[in-house]
Image (cartoon, rainbow, N blue to C red):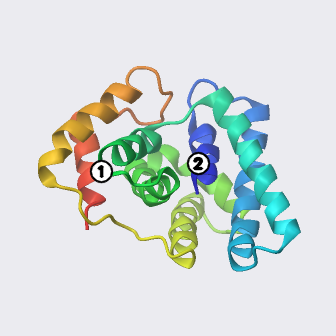
Amino acid sequence: MDALTHAVEAYLSLYYNTRETRALAESAVRDIFRYLPVACRDGQSLTARERMLRASFDAGCAFTRASVGNVHAIAHTLGGLYGIPHGLACAVTLPVVLEDYGAAVHPHLARLGSLIGLTGTERERAVGFLAAIRALNASLGIPDRFDGIRGEDLPRMAAWAAAETNPVYPVPVVYDQARFRRVLERLRA
């Protein structure tokens, strides 16, 4: 799920997103949705494992060129403060941040939705892509919130995330500490 987050955040990058980067991210997203469930159900499937290896590599190449964003900033704080594994932190945080971005990312999410077989209007495909991420998480036994995030930790977590992202991450929606805090609040069980 970290690889999916790499691909999606690279795809949403405002300044460093090239045709090549988009192609790498699109390939990764397509393969992750197709092969991650197979690889998790059947660890002996060499095809699924090989395709996931390639998807992870493609997503890594994409984010190396285009950077990551607010999801990773939050995931880093969750890992640093609570020891939450990075991939799990990304998986839970990704749909919450994408939903928070709203219409600013609908064209991009709609395109990614089309790649995984969604149809409909731009908004329908964008919202459908968010639902597909949540469904993928659920199919893998990934929760949609975290137990144990303490309210008193939110201010420093928001400050850490804001310091990481601003001004270097090319995100589609710039978050201040207050917005990071609102998103972090949504991650609490």
Where is mark 1, residue-wise?
Answer: 183
Q: Amino acid at mark 1?
A: Val
Disc 2 from disc 1: Cα separation: 22 Å
Q: Is residue 137 above or below residue 61?
A: below
Instruction: Specify the farthest residue to the right.
Output: 47
The residue furthest top is 167
Q: Amino acid at mark 2?
A: Pro
How far across and how far down the image is residue 136, in percent?
Answer: 58, 71
Q: Residue at x 63, y 41 (%)?
A: 11
Res 144 seen here = yes
Picture layout, residue 16 above or below residue 117? above
Image quadrant in which the N terminus is located? bottom right
Identify residue for label 2: 107
Q: Is residue 176 visible?
A: no
Q: Position of residue 24 (x, y in %)?
A: 77, 42
In this rendering, would 144 be left or right of 32? left
Q: Residues within 10 Å of mark 2 (few under 14, many from 20)?
A: some
Q: Residue at x 59, y 48 (%)?
A: 107
